[in-house]
Image (cartoon, grey):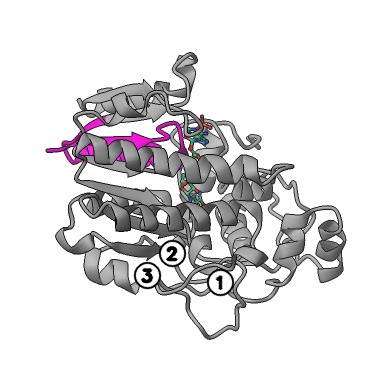
Amino acid sequence: MSRVLVTGATGFIAGHAIEELIKGGHDVRGTVRSLRDPARTAHLRRIADSLDGSLELVEADLSEDTGWEAAVAGQEYVLHIASPFPAAPPRDEADLIRPAVDGTLRVLSASVRAGVRRVVMTSSLSAVSSGRPRDGERSRSEEDWGDLDRSAPYAKSKILAERAAWDFVTDHPELELVVINPGLVLGPLQHAAARTSVALVRRLLNRELPAVPQLGFAPVDVRDVARAHVVAVEAPGAAGNRYVCAGENVWFGDIARMLSEEFGPQGYRVPTRRMPYWMLWAAGRFDREVRLGLDFVGSAELASSDKARRELGWTMRPVEETVADTGRSLIELGVVRSRS
Ligand code: NDP
């Protein structure tokens, strides 16, 4: 049993990581930006209580020094999961990049001072592959890095924050670092806040899109991502490594068809028609993120999780199960309009 700090406890992945840690018998402390609204953390208290686990919540913001010293005090491990993940790109990319990079350095510096053994950081598959050509054959892996010049602000924030973390531990070898690079994270929500990545499924179930762009993703279940983090905490040989955790390419249209099969009988009319390129091109005139995505229309997102399987014994559940469970939880929590 260890003492583990989880940053960004209110988040989608962090909530599942906290649940997994408590199930493993660990004592958990989580950071949140503010404790003022108890509704934002009620689900975590409920999970901890139902598992008879130990959970303490403290305040710390990635953009401020205050709170980090106290947050890491007495902790053996840190899961640094917090990072800005806005639904829409900010007007100034620095608003996203600065907290991601400076916040990571705050967490790592405080960890060194407190004698933390290992930090497991959540980076992203975008730090591995963003802006790189998808040639349909080459599978991206831990050897690869995204191209800053051809990346949207969010992907840039992940590339720069991960690089900053590796540079930091080069100067502070007493701190172990493991990085997890997940693909598109789907799976059940623990509370009714539609986080950025599951919004894709919400849009389909709510029929907020007229058709589906031919975009490829490498999805992964939030419960499997959480497990990868927890395994990485204590896996002896993991220090100094990045681990891609992502499934095989799935087209947006495949996700739509899975949802249609599962939820069509309940009255959900999920759009499955392919969106013509010109429609996406037109949307890209007003939205830079869409514009950057235009290069990838029709090309698969190929990523290899072989290293995580080999070294962490990591496994992934089938994508059909992940997609169905995402939809079910969005319906049960009322995030998606009920058809019954
Ligand atoms: P969420 O938006 O659900 O969680 C992000 C968390 O970061 C929230 O707890 C949020 O707090 C916190 N946060 C954001 N800005 C700050 C800040 N300035 N100070 C303190 N905390 C902050 O996203 P996910 O759970 O999906 O993402 C978690 C991590 O996983 C991120 O690092 C993300 O980049 C990474 N990731 C996610 C993927 C996905 O598909 N979901 C894929 C690959 C990587 P608050 O609730 O107060 O906003």
Total tally of numbered discs in the picture: 3
Q: Are marks 2 and 1 in contact (CB under 8 Å)?
A: yes
Task: Residue at 47% x, 57% y: name it.
Answer: 124
State how far apart marks 2 and 1 are (Cα): 10 Å
Task: Residue at 62% x, 68% y: name it.
Answer: 131
Q: Position of residue 140 (x, y in %)?
A: 47, 75
Name the secondary structure under disc 1.
loop
Q: Dot 3 corresponds to which residue? A: 305
Q: Are marks 3 and 1 in contact (CB under 8 Å)?
A: no
Label of residue 246 in the image: 2
- At label 3, which amino acid type do we have? Ser
Instruction: Give the quadrant of the C terminus.
Output: top right
| Callout 3 crowding tier (Cα within 10 Å): few <14, some 14–19, many ≥20 | many
> Does residue 241 appear left or right of residue 199 in this picture?
left
State how far apart marks 2 and 3 are (Cα): 6 Å
Please check the rendered image and state whether residue 71 is part of the magenta-colored stretch, yes or no: no
- At label 1, which amino acid type do we have? Glu
**Residue 73 in which image quadrant:** top left
Instruction: Give the quadrant of the N terminus.
Output: top left
**Residue 171 in which image quadrant:** bottom left
Q: Earlier in the sequence, mark 2 or mark 1?
A: 2
Q: Position of residue 242 (x, y in %)?
A: 35, 63
Q: Dot 1 corresponds to which residue? A: 301
Name the secondary structure under disc 2.
loop
Q: Are marks 2 and 3 in contact (CB under 8 Å)?
A: yes
The magenta span reads 1-28
State how far apart marks 3 and 1 are (Cα): 13 Å
Is residue 213 visible in the rendered image? The answer is no
**Residue 253 in which image quadrant:** bottom right
